Image: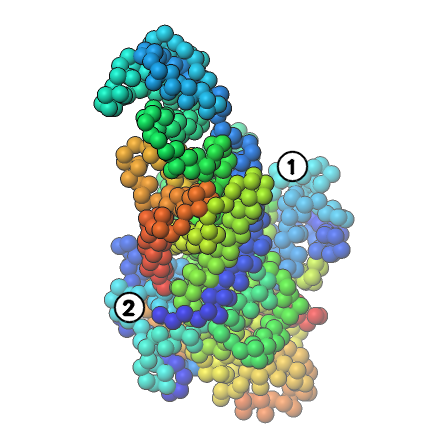
Amino acid sequence: MSGVSISVEGARKSFAGCEALKGVSLEFGAGRMHGIIGPEGSGKTTLLRLILGLLSPTSGAARYFEDGRPVAFESLRPSLAYMPQTQSLYPDLSIQEHLEFFRDLYGIGAADYSRKREELLSITRLGEFVERPAGQLSGGMYKKLALMCALLRSPRVMILDEPTTGVDPISRRELWDLLYRLLDQNILILVTTAYLDEAERCSMVHLLEGGLVVACGEPRALLEREGAGSFDELFLRRAAVRPA
Amino acid sequence: MTFVPARAGAVARKEWFHIRRDPFTLALALVLPLLMVIVYGVAIDFNVKEIHLAVSDLDQSQASRRLIDTFSSSHYFRPRPEASAALATADLSDERARAALIIPPRFEKDLLAGRGAKVQILLDGADNSTVGPISQYVASIQALASRRLAGVDPSPPYQLRTRFLFNPELNSRWFVIPGLTVVIMAILSIFLTALTVAREWENGSMELLLSTPVEPIEIIVGKAAPYAALGILATAFVYVIARGVFGVPFAGHLWVFALGCLLFLVTYLAQGLLISVLTRQQTIAMQFSMLTGMLPSNLLSGFIFPIASMPRLFWYLTMLLPARWFMVISRHAFLEGSGFSELAVPFAALALSCATMVALAARSFRRTLE
Amino acid sequence: MSEAAVVEARGLVVRYGDFTAVDRISFAVGRGEIFGFLGANGAGKTTTIRVLCGLLPPSEGGVSMAGVGYEQGERAIKEKVGYMSQRFTLYNDLTVGENLDFIASLRKLEPAAYRRRRRELLELIAFDKPMSAMVRDLSGGIKQQVSLAAALLHDPEIVFLDEPTAGVTPVGRERFWGLIRRVAGGGKTVFVTTHYMDEAEQCGRVALMREGRLVALDSPAGLKKTVFPEPVFEFDPIGRLSFDKLSAYKTHEAFSFFESYGPRFHAAAASPELWAAWAPRLEKLFRIRPIAPSLEDVFIRVVEARR
């Protein structure tokens, strides 16, 4: 098994008496696109932050593997890329300035940088806007810039928290295309989404609800198993059987 | 913990972009020093001349007349003879005088007998802006008077005379402007840095920064650097104005002053960062920096109110205040030309608070969102 | 224009300097209609809505909102229109009652009429919490429902909902759409912008904007029929093909449309002959099954094709 894989074992996380994760165990196999889907407050963001070392679990752990061998988180940190759900760029800095800032933070060489920059700008079609401040970009362009910043050094793990929220269908498709391109480079991708129709675009989905994993699997197989036509239907049905 | 200068540099460069584009920061950094120099240097004149001094001389001796003469010859006081202590006090309450001097009947006798003669000086405490300078004048004149009254002292009191030379006209500007560097540096460093980390939190960019390989120490150094530069620039600006426009003498060594500046600046930058890291919100950070930085450096540093005349509790409190120590260094460097040996205590205190603050700031900066 | 038109735009043009944000738009919307307003970010949707809400007089053309236009003044238009934005609607640190009172006083509603209207609306949204509940303690879905009630407080004939369900759970969204249908059923005209294509499907008619122009306007089913007259298929790659290889099919002669849909693709045949010629070879690489085009396919084809 080549590439990075991550496993989460019995992760619990409480904030001030409120339990956001109630014992989550998941396997994120290498080189695939894993969708973590679930309603608001199901613990998606908390799970990602645990994996990123931004939060420490109350109990349980996330373990990291490289080509099947366990590795320490710190050794993996440089190859992790993250795109937070909330706006996380600097509204007064231009696209160009963002790219240069992250180039220096990651210590990317000049040749590498200019090649990567050209490539990303042509894929995202942001080339003509490089001087525009992030605060003046549309929702889709903003997300694409955030993704560019994350992809500037070639990461081995890409973690995205609701990358397509508030983005029009065309930009959404472009974002997904960008992610699919990454899969060719054997990158592990974890992505959360609130658009349930996007669940079908992942190679694996992990359904979270109330801090627990309720189902996992290849999207279509999962729907067949649950006897639902779509993820929307699946969620509505689960909500109906659950006491209000 | 590794430190990669390039990453700190990247943070510093980005911070510089923010500063350049934020009119508020720029205005604070550039206009504030100018404004303060104008306000404190030109508009507010702490010099108080021709202070009416109600004098009740109950001794009517040679010694008592000499004492009164010392006051009147300083040109700062205009004696107004009164028949009794009660009348002199009444002058104060009726605002016919700002200060009252009451010489008891046995003044000369006690003096000659070496029993330690006592006179009473009453100040109008209602007027805060003048009570400070007046009490300073009184203190100086008292020192002078005690020498003169000793009579027998053969050699002109060398030390005393030099002390007057620091500020022979008792010019308040000479006293205020070296202090102004302290206040301006305090405001710039603590205010601006307190906002910067909090802004990253509010912006949501902190989450992204923390997920990159950048180390906390690199963020701290990178963020502090541009503000340090601004602080140094503002200090240089005040120094130039002090020397050029107000003609304040600079008696000391520039590098003594510079080292003091640097220590002070780093202390307050670290304090600002500490506030920012702990509060994570710009509005709260702003209030905290007002409370712990601006107000004390204005009120408790000896800038306006003399520390010696503060209540005991506050007097002890000022010992914890970096601004108080830097105030001593700045004034001495300007007016007295003191070196490290004379300023050992303030320098030691400043270095200690600097080290403490940097350690606190670095420790408080966590790599997680908790 | 039909007599029943409640919203009417006639040749709207909005210019900002040299830039034309809205370029000669005309349409009419009837009473009780749910009208979806779609377009890429920056296509001119928001500007158009601002004009229709009485917030921005057009450079050219005019509007008629329940019979009122800019000739009668911006305030007259605002009387007829309710607006609910995705970002700011209610004060988090006020209670539900305080929020509604505040809006009522802004709108200068009669106390008796306000109380009656408030009771009706809270019944409509089935609000079961006390008036003294703080807005910040409400869930995202309930907050959206209260926002809707706030937008309807002055009994406008037209209500604009700007991405009303962004960040709301599937269950909350379903409930909210139930409310929208009831509001429309009660005779109000509802304008909705959304990025969720499954929500757009629930609109009576959908308008698509691109670069300041109206490029399509029809019912979802009608749009699918006119935009995709040819059959549409889903292509599911059998082996693992590189993204670049797959993308190459976009310009393949067999397809008039070939767009990614996650790991799969939606495709339309260029012509029956070419399809017949290529199908055997393609079937070795893909599992192919016929599907109905999605509204997203329509969106992409209409907005992208003429680039």
Q: Residue at x 43, y 65 (%)?
A: B218
Quadrant housing residue C186: top right
Q: Quadrant of the N terminus of chain B?
A: bottom left
- CA gap, disc 1 to disc 2? 56 Å
Residue C75's disc is 1
Q: Quadrant of the C terminus of chain B?
A: bottom left
- Decide if residue B177 is in sight here: yes
Kindly indicate whether the residue at mark 2 contacts the one at mark 1 (C-beta within 8 angstroms).
no
Q: Is residue A97 left or right of residue B55?
A: right
Disc 2 sits on a residue from what chain? A
Q: Which residue bears the numbered disc 2?
A: A11
Nearer-the-camera pick, B68 or B92? B68
Disc 1 sits on a residue from what chain? C
Q: Residue at x 52, y 74 (%)?
A: A152
Nearer-the-camera pick, C130 or B26? B26
Mark 1 neighbour class, 10 Å CA radius: few under 14, some 14 to 19, many 20 or more: some
Label 1: which secondary element: helix
Q: Amino acid at mark 1?
A: Arg
Mark 2 neighbour class, 10 Å CA radius: few under 14, some 14 to 19, many 20 or more: many
Q: Residue at x 34, y 85 (%)?
A: A68
Label 2: which secondary element: strand
Vertical placement of residue B186 versus C286, above or below: above
Vertical placement of residue B119 versus A172, above or below: above
